[in-house]
Amino acid sequence: MDRTLTLLGIESSCDDTAAAVVRARPGAAPEILSSEVLGQTNLHEAFGGVVPEIAARAHAERLDGVVEQALRVAGIGLDGLDGIAVTAGPGLIGGVLSGVMLARGLAVARGLPLVAVNHLAGHALTPRLTDGVAFPYLMLLVSGGHCQFLLVQGPDQFQRLGGTIDDAPGEAFDKTAKLLGLPQPGGPAVEAEARLGDPSRFAFPRPLLDREGCDMSFSGLKTALLRARDALVAEKGGITQSDRRDLCAGFQAAVAEVLAKKTARALAVAGTGATALCVAGGVAANAAIRQRLEAVATEAQVQFIAPPLRLCTDNAAMIAWAGIERLQAGIAPSADFTARPRWPLDESAPALLGSGKKGAKA
Ligand code: KG4
Ligand code: ZN
C-alpha cells in the first residue's frame, strides 16, 4: 500500500443499518475510526423473522442518521474521505437498494470513488482488518443465515470448499431454543443451558460426517431434537430442567462435532493453501464450538483467528475494509454496478440450497 485511504462503509443488506469509517495507512495497522450499527430486532420480533418490507423502510429512514453519526464519531466530514464502499448484495433487495442509492448520491455529489462490496467478502476479509492475517487462509462463516468454508486467496479471490445444504447452524440453535421454550436469539440461551447438561445422554445424529467433502446439514438435528423432546413429554407429561439442559448439551455437541470434523477436512483439502483458520458469524461466539475449532487449528498447525464479536456479526467496518482492499489491489471501482439479491462469492461453485429463517442474511 502506498497511500493513506479513508473509506466510509455502508451496510443495509438485512436487519442492521450500519455505517463506519476505516482508515488504512502505509506501514501501520488499519484503524476503525467509527462503526455504528442500528439493529432492527424489535421491529421484526412479532413476526418470527425479518420482514423485507419493514427492513427496507427502516433502512431508508435511518441510513442518513447512521452515516452522519459514523462521520461525527470519526471526526471527519465527507471531504475527509477517499471513497465510499457499500454492500451491493447479497441480501434483501429493498435494504441493499437503500444503501446503494445513498452511497451513489454521496459519491456523485462529492466526486468520490464508489466501491460495490459483496457482503460475504466483508465477513471473509475481516481477519485482515483485525489481525492482519496474510492470504491465503480458510474462513468458516457460521451465522444465522449462512454456513460455508471459503478459501480466501485475495481481496477478490474466494473458493468455496463446502457449506450447509439446508439450515445454517445459528438457525438450528434458534429453532432448538423455540422447541424448548427458550428465548431468541437461541444461540446464547442454548449455550447457557448446555453448559449445565450432559452431552452424552441423547445420541443425536452427526449428519453427512460419513460423506466425503465439506458439505454439512443441520436440519435433521432439529427433527431429532423434536422427537427426543416429544418422547419425554409422552413418557412423563413434560420435560424437566435437567432434561432441557441435557437436550441442549446433546444438540450443541452434535453441531460442534460436525463443524469441527468438517473444518479439519476443509483444512486438509486446502493443505498448504491455508495458513490460518478464521471464523466469523454469530455462532462463532459459542465457546464450546470455538474451543473445538481452535483445537482443530492447533492439530493442523495453523493459526486460529476469531475477530471480536462486534466485527464477526453484521457491521459496516468490514464493508469499508473490503472497499479499501479492493482499491489497494487496484481493482477499479465501477460506478454502474447493480444491487444483487443473490451474489455467490465463488461463482464457479455449484449453488447450495442455503437457508431460511432470516432470508438472505449472511
Ligand atoms: O452473525 P449473526 O449476528 O447474524 C446473522 O447473520 O445471522 O448471527 C446470529 C446467529 C443467531 O442464529 C444466533 O442464535 C447465533 O448466531 N448465535 C449463537 C450464539 N450467539 C449467537 N449460536 C450459538 N452459540 C452462541 N453463543
Ligand atoms: Zn452477515
Image: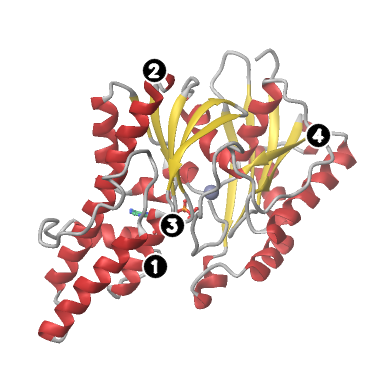
Label 1 element class: loop
Q: Is residue 266 visible?
A: yes
Give the mark toward the camera: 4 or 2: 2
Ligand 1 near label 1 (Cβ, under 8 Å)? yes
Q: Is residue 170 above or below residue 333?
A: below
- Say which quarter of the image contains residue 268: top left
Q: Is residue 285 above or below residue 222?
A: above
Distance Cα–Cα, label 2 vs label 3: 30 Å
Pointer 1 local density, CA inside 10 Å: few below 14, some 14–19, many at least 20? some
Q: Are marks 4 and 2 in contact (CB under 8 Å)?
A: no
Which is nearer the eye, 222 or 25? Answer: 222
Label 4 amino acid? Ser
**Residue holding disc 4:** 334
Which one is earlier in the sequence, the residue at label 2 or at label 1? 1
Distance Cα–Cα, label 2 vs label 1: 40 Å
**Residue holding disc 1:** 184
Label 3 element class: loop
